Image (spheres, helix red, strand yellow):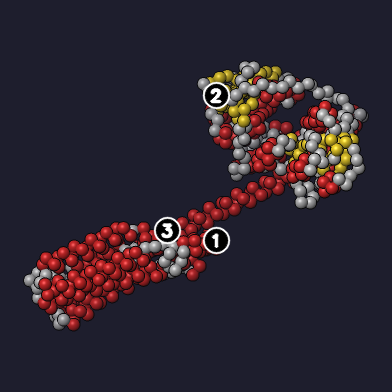
């Protein structure tokens, strides 16, 4: 006996052993109605479930016909005959009920035992009908009794019960041979035996062919299901492989780019010779292009495999857009483009700020770089319970055909040379996927020579009062002691060099064990910067939380990481730890460090 969990485990093992080429090979050898042992067990269980799915029609028809013929025997046959026939019919009825109960329990009865039990009930029913027919022939009852009732039995065994072909054919021919043997034993004429045998044999042959076709069809359906499952498993493995690749690529590629960005920034601040400064500036621009390309490629890949999940919250829109547009001031001035904002002062959104920023940023970058415009404007308007954010330009515009093509990956309409200054053609493709992810209505309105308007509609949010923050002087030297925990030597040296150049005292560690043990020189610490992936058992996040729990350090902390997973972002936010991603722009790193040092300076010093 098999329990349901064992049967499921057996099916899982069988499925895991299959591969698509092997299944395709078996699909070309179905004529033998026999799989290799590794597949046959699974098919037998599959066919058993199919047989059990028709138990109620089989039960109702079998029991119904049994009861009907019991009444017919009682009503039309002499007492000397129907006493015996009804007794036999009742006994066979009990056997049929038992076989129906026993055989139709998938997962609890082995398929082979279920098929054999159902076949036994089928053959016994046929033999019972044969006995009644032959008794009526011997007794010469007034009501003519022919072998026509056997056709119902054979029809049931070949087509209704759902037995395997071998069981069905064997049982049917046993019934036919039993009837013909009975005819011979009661002394029927040779012509009658041959005539009845010809009709019953032809009918059974047709039933055998039907049973063969039924099992052949089931075996093909089973293989198709297994092929579908194998393809689904392969797709899941490929998706998981892509996820692992993206996680590895995102971390490993961002690490050296982060160090490169910081070293270049240090060179920019140290070099004074004009020609050298020009070369360093070009190097910085190339690094920024490489960073943008990497971010675009990783973003489109992460979106395509479903790694991104929206994190919704309320944000005030006007200040958010002002800060976003401020990052495009230099790019707009270099191209002599007027950058404008038209937004109500008190409006809010309920959205994922990071995803929405990427979406609007890509629209702005597309308008500044590709539209050939002299004016780009962000316009916010109310639409019922939505706010429409539109990025409008007065550039060259788009035809109907171009409006459909621009959202395709790696498409650039006016960059035939594929110059890197204009990107790699993924910005609007990322926008389309972000719109689908966030489920925001969107569209583009444009005519050739009349500019373009890219718009999205975002749900309204709740306005929240914001504290006014004082402007930070960008060129002032920083003051404070920073503890840097970074396992990568090059990144550690780059961060240390830049922080010292800005005026900070820097203490570096490869892992956090010494900090937890207090094995360091004494002194007050104003800021803790930690990478997420560290040597040893603790991550940077776990190190910060452990230091807080032990009251060793409770001041401001920043987690600097190349890991862009949503789970890490949610965990860091819940712990109140600021998260910045590698490669971080030096200007942003300076603003963050300066802000946190001033915040820490206003509080009491903490010891670590």
State which quarter of the image contains the C terminus: top right
Please tell me the numbered disc located at residue 386: 2
x, y (%) of residue 392?
62, 21
Task: Give the total number of marks visible in the rendering.
Answer: 3
Reading the image, the residue beneath label 3 is 221
Q: Residue at x 24, y 74 (%)?
A: 127
The residue positioned 48% from the left and 58% from the top of the image is: 226
Along the horizontal axis of the image, is 587 left or right of 202?
Answer: right
| First reached walking from the N terminus: tag 3 or tag 2 | 3
Residue at point 16% right, 64% down? Answer: 71
Callout 3: 10 Å neighbours few (<14), some, many (20+)?
few
Residue displayed at 22% across by 65% down: 66
312 sits to left or right of 259: left
- Res 156 seen here: yes
Contact flag, marks 3 and 1 (Cβ < 8 Å): no
Please provide percent x and percent y for residue 246: 67, 46
Q: Earlier in the sequence, mark 2 or mark 1?
A: 1
How far apart marks 3 and 2 lie (CA) works out to: 49 Å
Task: Give the vertical position of 64 relative to 351 (above or below).
Answer: below
Task: Identify the residue under disc 1.
Answer: 16
Residue 218 placement: quadrant: bottom left
Callout 3 secondary element: helix
Secondary structure under tag 1 reads helix
Quarter of the picture holding the N terminus: bottom left
The reply to whether discs 2 and 1 touch (Cβ–Cβ < 8 Å) is no
């Amino acid at each position: 006996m098999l329990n349901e969990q064992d049967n499921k485990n057996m099916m899982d093992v069988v499925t895991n052993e299959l591969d698509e080429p092997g299944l395709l090979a078996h699909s070309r050898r179905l004529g033998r109605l026999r799989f290799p042992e590794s597949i046959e067990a699974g098919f037998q269980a599959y066919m058993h479930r199919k047989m059990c799915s028709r138990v109620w029609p089989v039960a109702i028809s079998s029991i119904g016909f049994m009861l009907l013929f019991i009444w017919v025997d009682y009503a039309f046959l002499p007492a000397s005959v129907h006493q015996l026939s009804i007794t036999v019919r009742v006994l066979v009825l009990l056997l049929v009920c038992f076989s129906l109960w026993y055989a139709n329990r998938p997962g609890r009865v082995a398929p082979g035992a279920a098929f054999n039990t159902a076949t036994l009930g089928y053959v016994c029913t046929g033999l019972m009908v044969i006995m009644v027919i032959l008794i009526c022939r011997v007794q010469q009852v007034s009501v003519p009794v022919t072998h026509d009732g056997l056709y119902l039995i054979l029809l049931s065994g070949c087509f209704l019960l759902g037995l395997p072909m071998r069981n069905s054919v064997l049982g049917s021919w046993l019934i036919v041979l039993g009837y013909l043997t009975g005819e011979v034993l009661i002394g029927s004429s040779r012509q009658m035996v041959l005539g009845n045998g010809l009709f019953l044999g032809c009918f059974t042959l047709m039933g055998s062919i039907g049973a063969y076709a039924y099992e052949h069809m089931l075996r093909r359906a089973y293989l198709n299901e297994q092929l579908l499952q194998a393809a689904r498993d392969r797709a899941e493995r490929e998706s998981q492989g892509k996820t692992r690749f993206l996680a590895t690529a995102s971390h490993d590629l961002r690490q050296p780019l982060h160090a490169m960005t910081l070293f270049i920034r240090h060179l920019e601040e140290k070099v004074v010779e004009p020609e050298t400064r020009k070369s360093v500036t070009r190097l910085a621009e190339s690094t920024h292009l490489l960073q943008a390309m990497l971010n675009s490629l990783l973003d489109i890949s992460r979106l395509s495999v479903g790694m991104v999940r929206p994190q919704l919250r309320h944000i005030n829109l006007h200040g958010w857009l002002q800060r976003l547009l401020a990052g495009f001031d230099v790019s707009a001035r270099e191209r002599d483009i007027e950058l404008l904002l038209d937004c109500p002062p008190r409006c809010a959104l309920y959205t994922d700020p990071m995803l929405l920023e990427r979406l609007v940023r890509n629209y702005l970058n597309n308008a500044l770089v590709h539209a050939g415009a002299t004016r780009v404007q962000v316009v916010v308007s109310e639409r019922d319970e939505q706010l429409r954010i539109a990025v409008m330009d007065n550039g060259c515009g788009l035809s109907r055909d171009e409006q459909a093509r621009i959202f395709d990956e790696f498409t650039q309409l006016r960059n035939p040379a594929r110059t890197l200054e204009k990107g790699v053609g993924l910005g609007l493709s990322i926008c389309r996927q972000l719109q689908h992810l966030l489920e925001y209505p969107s569209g583009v309105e444009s005519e050739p020579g009349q500019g373009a308007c890219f718009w999205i509609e975002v749900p309204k949010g709740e306005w929240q009062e914001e504290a006014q923050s004082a402007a930070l002087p960008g060129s002032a030297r920083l003051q404070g002691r920073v503890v840097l925990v970074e396992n990568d030597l090059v990144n550690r040296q780059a961060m240390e060099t830049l922080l010292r150049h800005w005026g900070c005292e820097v203490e570096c560690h490869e892992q956090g064990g010494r900090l937890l043990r207090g094995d360091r020189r004494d002194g007050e610490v104003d800021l803790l910067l930690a990478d997420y992936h560290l040597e040893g058992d603790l991550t940077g996040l776990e190190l910060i939380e452990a230091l807080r729990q032990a009251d060793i350090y409770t001041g401001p902390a920043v987690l600097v990481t190349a890991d862009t997973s949503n789970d890490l972002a949610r965990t860091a936010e819940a712990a109140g730890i600021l998260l910045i991603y590698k490669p971080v722009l030096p200007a942003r790193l300076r603003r963050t460090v300066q802000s946190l040092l001033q915040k820490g300076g206003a509080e009491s010093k903490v010891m670590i």
